[in-house]
Image (spheres, grey):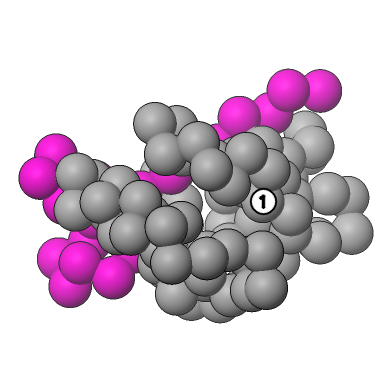
Amino acid sequence: MIIRVDQTGAVRVDGHTVFTDFHVEAPGGFSVPDLAAMMGEGTRPDGDHLWIAESAVRHWLAGLTDDDWDESFSGMVSYARSKGWTDEAGTHLKAHVDYPD
């Protein structure tokens, strides 16, 4: 699952059925705090990473998912928790940021 942020700050989720990858891609020139502010939805910066709310991912994909997706995404979140890739509350997933440009 790749969360893409464009120059305008619009968020798009690509590969939403790929549960073995979770990161953000953004154009160069945006700092991690800038990206967090543009993405909204409770996204928080943390060094070179972003904390992205599970609910934000669900919001960005509203109308594009089904019960099978929900079960798979919940499994991905559980796996992330087991690896320490969620915040203390367990509501946000840690994502690294790539700048492919």
- Residue at 73% x, 23% y: name it: 100
Q: Left or right: where does residue 43 sit relative to residue 16? A: left
14 left or right of 24 in image: right
Image quarter for residue 84? Answer: top left
- x, y percent for residue 47: 41, 44
Question: Is residue 79 in the magenta section?
Answer: no
Horizontal arrangement in the rendering, residue 44 relative to residue 30 (left or right) = left
The residue shown at (23%, 46%) is 80
Residue 48 image position (x, y, % from top left): 46, 39
Q: Which residues are magenta?
A: 81-101
Q: Is residue 17 above or below residue 101?
A: below
**Residue at label 1?**
13
Front position in the image: 64 or 93: 64
Please tell me how many numbered marks the rendered image carries.
1
Quadrant location of the N terminus?
Answer: top right
Measured along the vertical axis of the image, is residue 82 above or below residue 33? above
Q: Position of residue 4 (x, y in %)?
A: 71, 45
Along the viewing direction, whichever of 66 and 76 lies nearer the viewer: 66
- Is residue 20 in view? yes
Please report the residue visible at 79 percent of the width from the left and 37 percent of the height from the top: 27
Q: Is residue 74 left or right of residue 48?
A: left
Residue 75 coordinates in the image, percent (x, y): 25, 51
